[in-house]
Image (cartoon, rainbow, N blue to C red):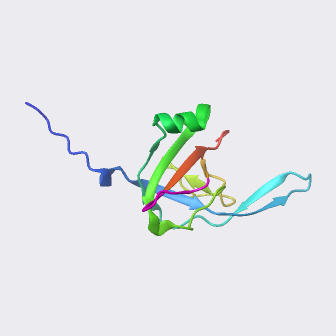
Amino acid sequence: MITKINANPSDWVKDVYIASKIRVDLDEEGNEITIYDKPNKTPYRFNYQPVSTDAEIAEFGENAKIMKKAVIPVSYQGMFKEFDVAYLDGVTPVGEMQNGDNANYRLLPPRDGNSVIIIYFEKLTGK
């Protein structure tokens, strides 16, 4: 018997929380501390996947292994920016002491894809 698999991209969406970078302050020792806004209460629902095309791997090199990509509707234009942080792969902002503490990815500059926006997420090392 052949089992038919119904691959429906709407089933691939996952929760995404994003905290916007507000500014960078200095602590008592002169170290930079990034200050983030409170992440969205209700998660966005995006389909994000690991970077996998030859062009992306050539562009990002070794970092391609720690990156994910989302293609989202153009209606999100201007909502996200470079250096915002994201909570992917089931990570949430619940229980954070400071906004952004639990985030496990950083956004690269969003790219205009005509009728869509392309967002690349780079894994935060040490998380």
Q: Position of residue 67 (x, y in %)?
A: 55, 41
Q: Taking 56 as reference, is 5 left or right?
A: left
Q: Is residue 29 magenta?
A: no
Q: Nearer the viewer, residue 60 or 106?
A: 60
Check the image and report above or below for 63 versus 73. Answer: above
The residue lying furthest to the left in this view is: 1
Q: Nearer the viewer, residue 85 or 81?
A: 81
User: Which quadrant is the C terminus positioned in?
Assistant: top right
Q: Which residues are magenta?
A: 109-117
The residue lying furthest to the right in this view is: 29
Q: Position of residue 123 (x, y in %)?
A: 60, 43
Q: Quadrant of residue 75?
A: bottom left
Q: In this rendering, does residue 65 appear at all?
A: no
Residue in view at x 55 percent, y 53 percent: 87
Q: In this rendering, does residue 77 appear at all?
A: yes
User: Which quadrant is the N terminus positioned in?
Assistant: top left
Q: Quadrant of residue 81?
A: bottom right
Residue in view at x 47 percent, y 57 percent: 113
Check the image and report above or below for 29 versus 75. Answer: above
The residue lying furthest to the front in this view is: 114
Q: Position of residue 120 (x, y in %)?
A: 54, 49
Q: Taking 92 as reference, is 23 left or right?
A: right
Q: Position of residue 23 (x, y in %)?
A: 76, 64
Residue in view at x 25 percent, y 45 percent: 7
Q: Nearer the viewer, residue 10 or 104?
A: 10
